[in-house]
Image: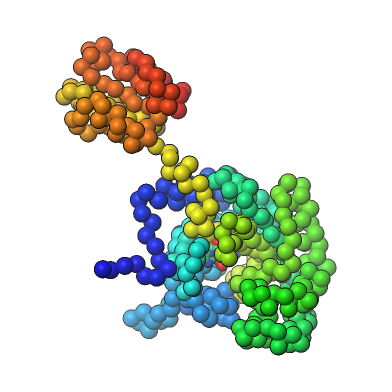
């Protein structure tokens, strides 16, 4: 039997409503903040990710799906969305149209060890904002993430964690300090961390092994070594979040698995997810556009893992959204009239499941239940003669005769 590749899943029809719900909310909520959607290619030149995400990151070193195409070019399936958006920004010379605000959704690919909340093909909804340099943008973006998560019904279970990763000026001396401290503690660090220490020392702070975690508690933290500009940026950001009433905690040990970040980094975590607890993550990347050959432009963004959101959502509540109306018909002329009535109601924005032929009233009421209809509209010969219908409120169990000309109004005021 043929099966999906390990770490890759179908999204089956009875699950798809949740995904559509999450995407529709993104369109609405991000739209309120002026973001429009961008659709980037699923694969790019490998070099794009190596340069943007960082050649020494786990993502680029170990996790990319990389292949040579028939022309011999090295291509990779996108492991994340930011690199393509930045490439697009540079390619289209969009620095003339700031601020540029885009969101995206779609599959990403990483060869990771699959576990709960971690797949090899997974889906992100992300946003990127180009132009603003100050912390107002950081605060607004975080408020937007929390607005989105609250609106889909999740905020209560989540924590917004923030940190500053400094800039080139203050991170370089900090990095040297950190390497020195890690070298001293090398005997207590795992093999991976010993390997990471010289090339990507910040990642050591993020190791999940207990002994490493205990060892790095004594290591210097970036927040104590920020330059004046970075310190001020972080201080103001916290002030803006407080003004907005967005709760946060400072996590000085948060590092990100991608190299492009500077200053603000943030994650939204959930206790309900186990080890893979980040549902959203992002930060500033003020140097990336220039590094990719564009006109220097500050930027900030984030991405949410859709599988993780789906795991946390009350799926019953979302999937329970049934049809507005089940239209039951009895007899040939009622079937004919029903066809027209269903179409009229749908054009008025009411969802209708129409009886597509035959069946007793009893069996049709069962189908109405299965369609989770709010109302059943019943149409038989008597009603056709009287130019009316019977409408049953399925929750209340009461029914009422309504004139044909009044049906639309009757339903719209009650839905
Ligand atoms: P990231 O932290 O690598 O950042 O991924 C963002 C989110 O995608 C994670 O917090 C998680 O929810 C989800 N995710 C990542 N890997 C997997 C996986 N293997 N399975 C399931 N979910 C996963 C980025 O990708 C950056 N591009 C975010 C960003 C945008 N920063 C600035 N702009």
Nearer to me, 412 or 156: 156
* In this view, 247 is above or below 328: below
Quadrant for the C terminus in the image: top left
Specify whether residue 42 is in view.
no
Quadrant for the N terminus in the image: bottom left
Which residue appears at 29% of the width and 34% of the height? 367
Rendering quadrant holding ligand 1: bottom right
Which residue appears at 48% of the width and 42% of the height? 317
Which residue appears at 47% of the width and 61% of the height? 123
Nearer to me, 330 or 396: 396
Looking at the picture, the colour scheme in use is: rainbow
Which residue appears at 41% of the width and 47% of the height? 17
Q: Is residue 16 left or right of residue 259?
A: left
In the rendering, at what x and y percent does residue 70 appear?
Answer: 33, 81
Residue sitting farthest toward the top: 386
Specify whether residue 256 is in view.
yes
Q: Is residue 201 left or right of residue 404?
A: right
The quadrant holding residue 32 is top right
In the rendering, at what x and y percent does residue 281 appear?
Answer: 61, 62
* In this view, 188 is above or below 299: below
In the rendering, at what x and y percent does residue 333 appear?
Answer: 18, 22
The quadrant holding residue 185 is bottom right
In the rendering, at what x and y percent does residue 162 appear?
Answer: 70, 61
Nearer to me, 343 or 292: 343
């Amino acid at each position: 039997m043929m099966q999906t590749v390990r770490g890759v899943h179908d999204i089956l029809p009875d699950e798809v409503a949740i995904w559509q719900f999450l995407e529709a909310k993104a369109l609405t909520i991000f739209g309120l903040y002026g973001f429009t959607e961008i659709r980037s290619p699923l694969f790019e030149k490998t070099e794009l990710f190596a340069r943007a995400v960082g050649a020494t990151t786990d993502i680029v070193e170990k996790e990319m799906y990389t292949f040579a195409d028939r022309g011999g070019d090295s291509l990779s399936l996108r492991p994340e969305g930011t690199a393509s958006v930045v490439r697009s920004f540079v390619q289209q010379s969009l620095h003339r149209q700031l601020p540029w605000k885009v969101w995206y959704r779609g599959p990403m690919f990483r060869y990771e060890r699959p576990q709960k909340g971690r797949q090899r093909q997974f889906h992100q909804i992300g946003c990127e904002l180009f132009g603003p340099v100050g912390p107002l943008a950081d605060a607004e973006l975080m408020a937007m993430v929390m607005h989105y998560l609250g609106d889909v019904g999740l905020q209560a279970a989540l924590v917004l964690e923030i940190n500053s990763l400094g800039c080139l000026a203050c991170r370089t001396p900090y990095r040297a300090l950190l390497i020195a401290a890690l070298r001293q503690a090398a005997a207590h660090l795992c093999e991976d961390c010993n390997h990471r220490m010289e090339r990507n020392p910040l990642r050591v702070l993020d190791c999940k092994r207990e002994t490493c975690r205990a060892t790095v508690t004594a290591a210097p933290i970036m927040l104590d070594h920020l330059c004046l500009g970075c310190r001020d940026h972080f201080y103001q950001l916290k002030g803006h979040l407080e003004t907005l009433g967005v709760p946060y905690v400072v996590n000085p040990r948060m590092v990100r698995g991608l190299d492009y970040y500077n200053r603000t980094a943030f994650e939204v975590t959930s206790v309900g997810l186990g080890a893979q607890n980040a549902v959203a993550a992002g930060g500033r990347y003020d140097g990336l556009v220039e590094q990719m050959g564009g006109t220097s432009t500050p930027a900030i963004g984030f991405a949410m893992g859709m599988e993780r959101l789906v795991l946390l959502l009350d799926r019953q509540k979302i999937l329970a959204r049934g049809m507005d109306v089940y239209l039951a018909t009895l007899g040939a002329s009622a079937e004919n009239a029903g066809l027209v009535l269903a179409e009229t109601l749908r054009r008025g924005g009411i969802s209708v499941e129409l009886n597509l032929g035959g069946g007793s009233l009893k069996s049709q009421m069962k189908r109405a239940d299965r369609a989770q209809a709010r109302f059943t509209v019943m149409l038989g010969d008597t009603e056709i003669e009287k130019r009316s219908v019977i409408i049953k409120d399925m929750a209340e169990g009461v029914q009422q005769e309504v004139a044909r000309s009044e049906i639309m109004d009757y339903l719209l005021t009650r839905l």
